[in-house]
Image (cartoon, helix red, strand yellow):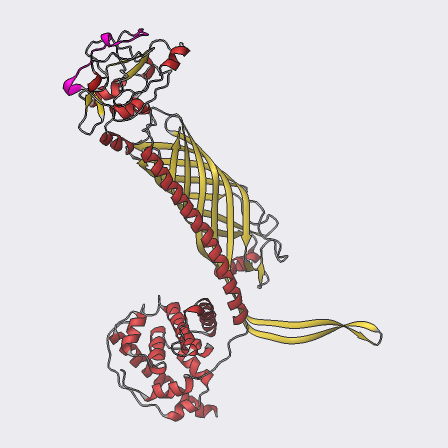
Amino acid sequence: MERPNNIDDLMRQRLRRAEVPPPAFVWPNVEAALRKRKRRFLIWLFFGGFAVATLAVGLWWVYQSATEPEAFQPVAHGTPPDTAPLASPNPNETIGTNSTNLNEPAQKLPNATVSTATAIKTPKGGVRAGASDDLLETAVFEQSAPQNSSANNAANLEIQLGQPPADIASGEPDATTADASTTSVQAGTTSMSFGMTALALNLPIPLALPVRTNPIMQSVLLPPAKAKRATKKCYDFHANPKAWLVDAYVGPSWAAKHLATRDTEQQDYLAERERTERRDFGLNAGLRASYLFGGNFLLRTGLNLDHFEEQFEHIDPNFIQYDIRITQKFINGQWVSVTDTLGILYGTNYLKSYNRFTLLDIPLQVALELRSGATGVSLNLGGSVNVLFEKRGSMLHPDGFPVSFTPGSGQQEVFRSSLGMSLMGSIQWFYHIGPRTRVFAEPYYRHILDPVTRPELPYEQSYGIAGLRLGLTRIFD
Amino acid sequence: MYAVCLRYARSSSDAADILQEGFVKVFTKLDQFQFQGSFEGWVRRIMINTALRTYQRQRFEYETSGYEHLPEAPVEPDALASLSEAELLRLISRLPDGYRMVFNMVAIEGYSHAEVADMLGIQESTSRSQLTKARRWLCEQLETLNQIAPQRT
């Protein structure tokens, strides 16, 4: 403990219990601040709820991506699906069957043949085609008579464990009746069992249906470990150069204000405005749909919200406020207005307000997307049209006193009702967390082309907004 | 409470700010008062913490730490008697931020240097140094005022 000193004692005696009445403006300001805290809480609650909802949708997407089949993959060896040659009959070609039923005659498989798919049993019970992954990729379904609708119906094929096998037999390309005699089933180590209770195959089967889009082939030919690995791959934009991308994002932003005038008499006023207004918190959020065309180009639109705040502080050292009461009294047979002065507040007045600006825009951007594996960047450039400009708060009047610019307050109309066009540019870095789901970070800048102030005012107030968007993208075919 | 804020603030407008912010905290955290000790003490503590946070960033920016032993001249009680409370508050408000905080907390509120060091995030030796310098500065100012006072009368 510090050794007592007599100046400490003397000061403590005089000041410890000293009472000084606070300025009169403090209590109304406390009341106003408490009301504002409630409003700010509601704003945070809204945007917090939005962020949570975005996260929930993102997680749902991720979950969906993990449970649904892999996106379209091209046929390997550069063979286009529509030009895949019909397989030649090969007595060694085999497609799966239950080893216990190898001697049973195969069921008819009208109009459908399977070629070049050699099935072997995998340790995990799954079945893969051929001895290598290459063969898996080249498994091709062929259809010899797609026009035959009755045959299509008949081709609904059910395979059940323990039931007589439904051999997807190979044979002559134009064979409409395939039986066991045309099928060479390899028993022993190359036999297979279907790891499922039922499969349904609906015809018409495309001429060359890729493995990854075919539920039967996927279940039959892809081992579980392979399927799991495959979900981590990216969406194949080369195979599917037209797609829709939907983004949801939220993030911080910073609004840079610029005040300018050609009127020299306004310079001091603008300097005072700069002194009394200070940038505060800002955020952006939005939903955006993008159409992918040409493999690497995107056309983007949606809804973008930019919200930013500014603090306005004003100290009036010569503040005087009269509280008066006007009553009507009946005196000498007539009504007279009587004015009573209830009180006079004077001293230094301190005003602090949080000015809020909210912009809702419809952007239209063109983007170039460059990909490398699971990651990539997109360069976005375009404009946006403002559809809503909400503003509330106070500012300094040219005569030196604070006024409200909130529309409807009846004090001062400063800002335009709509902001028109903005130029926007951004660079998005994205990363695939699933074949159809990406996360991204996107720094952006938008410049509002016209001043936000009304044209009749002798000064102009302009804004540029920079920010960071953090979000999720979902890819649709 | 305004007097408390005036002691910790640089100016009356800063003190009004602190008072306003402090009372907003009082009203929003009223449910956290646990009726242990006086309500006035709880409010006073909030005001002090608000004041400390107001100056936290720049307070010790240009002030070196380390204990400096300076001679402490005793102050005559009459030296303070001639000054009003408003003048004393104004005198304290002219102390540099670091001196003012430590002097208020140790000399007037009765906090120990360890508590001050903890609340301000400084070393105890810095707190002692600041207090010593504050006392010396106040003594010099009081001496100057007392020399001027007879001339005024």
Q: Position of residue A308 (x, y in %)?
A: 47, 52
Pick the quarter of the image with the C terminus of chain A. Answer: top left
Whether residue A276 appears in this view of the structure is no
Q: Which span is picked out in magenta?
A: A173-190
Q: Which residue in the rendered view is the most extreme toward the left?
A: A189
Pick the quarter of the image with the N terminus of chain A. Answer: bottom left
Relative to A404, A117 lies left or right:
left
Chief SS of the magenta region: loop
Relative to A263, A116 lies left or right:
left
Vertical order, B42 against A476 (above or below): below
Relative to B42, A406 lies left or right:
right
Q: Please tell me which residue lies in front, A448 or A105.
A: A105
Q: Position of residue A373 (x, y in %)?
A: 28, 32
Whether residue A311 appears in this view of the structure is yes
Relative to A422, B136 lies left or right:
left
- Taking the spot 28% from the left edge, 9% from the top edge, the residue there is A178
Q: Position of residue B39 (x, y in %)?
A: 43, 77
Vertical order, A7 against A131 (above or below): below
Instruction: Name the quadrant containing residue A170.
Output: top left
Instruction: Name the quadrant containing residue A365.
Output: top left
Vertical order, A207 against B24 (above or below): above
Q: Is residue A12 magenta?
A: no
Q: Is residue A175 magenta?
A: yes
- Taking the spot 34% from the left edge, 27% from the top edge, the residue there is A237
